[in-house]
Image: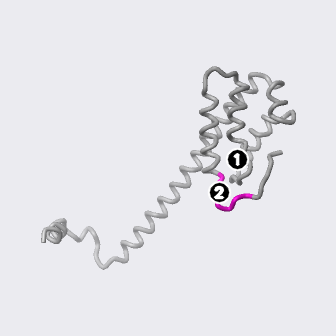
Amino acid sequence: MIPSLPPNPHADGVHYASEKFAVAVSDMACRGHTIRERLHLAYDEFAPVGLFPLPEPLQGRFQAIFTRLTAVGTLETTLPVISDEECHRIARLICDFRVDLEMELDARRSVVHERDRQTVNALLGRLPFRFDELGTESFEREGSG
């Protein structure tokens, strides 16, 4: 079970998770470590993500990664007994989850940009003139005087 604290209402779980999983994936890419050591480094980085709310289905996917890494109780008791293949599958899940977090953030940015575009268009519609009716000459004369 993921430890829980009262959620921080000012924290955005997706942004936080994205940052933590970016570091976790980077940690897994380091050379000179076994796959189990890499998973341990990654886990240490992303485990606090469970303290913040994530939207479904991201929450379920995070829980699945966490559960696989603690299937025998704790990370320390699970890593020695799972196969190398399972370790590699978990590493792939971690990398895929990082991509999913970025896709969620991109989708949020798209919504914000669309809202901004609509706001600008609404404001432009309230102006007493239209930009396409103004010639560049009028701006040049105003600026040169």
Q: Is residue 107 left or right of residue 58?
A: left
Q: What type of secondary structure mainly makes up the magenta span?
A: loop
Q: Give me the C-alpha separation between circle 2 and circle 1.
A: 11 Å
The picture quadrant where one finds residue 32 is top right
Task: Give me the residue at 71% from left, 26% from top.
Answer: 37
**Mark 2 packing: few (<14 Cα in 10 Å), some, or many (20+)?**
few
Q: Nearer the viewer, residue 33 or 82?
A: 33
Which of pointers 2 and 1 lies earlier in the amino acid sequence? 2
Task: Give me the residue at 78% from left, 54% from top.
Answer: 5
**In the rendered view, would you say 143 is above or below 54?**
below
Farthest bottom residue in view: 128
| Mark 2 secondary-structure assignment | loop
Return the residue at label 2. 11
The picture quadrant where one finds residue 77 is top right
- Tell me where residue 46 appears, x and y as whole percent: 69, 41
Q: Magenta segment, which residues?
A: 7-13
Task: Give me the residue at 19% from left, 68% from top.
Answer: 139
Return the residue at label 1. 49
Image quadrant containing the N terminus: top right
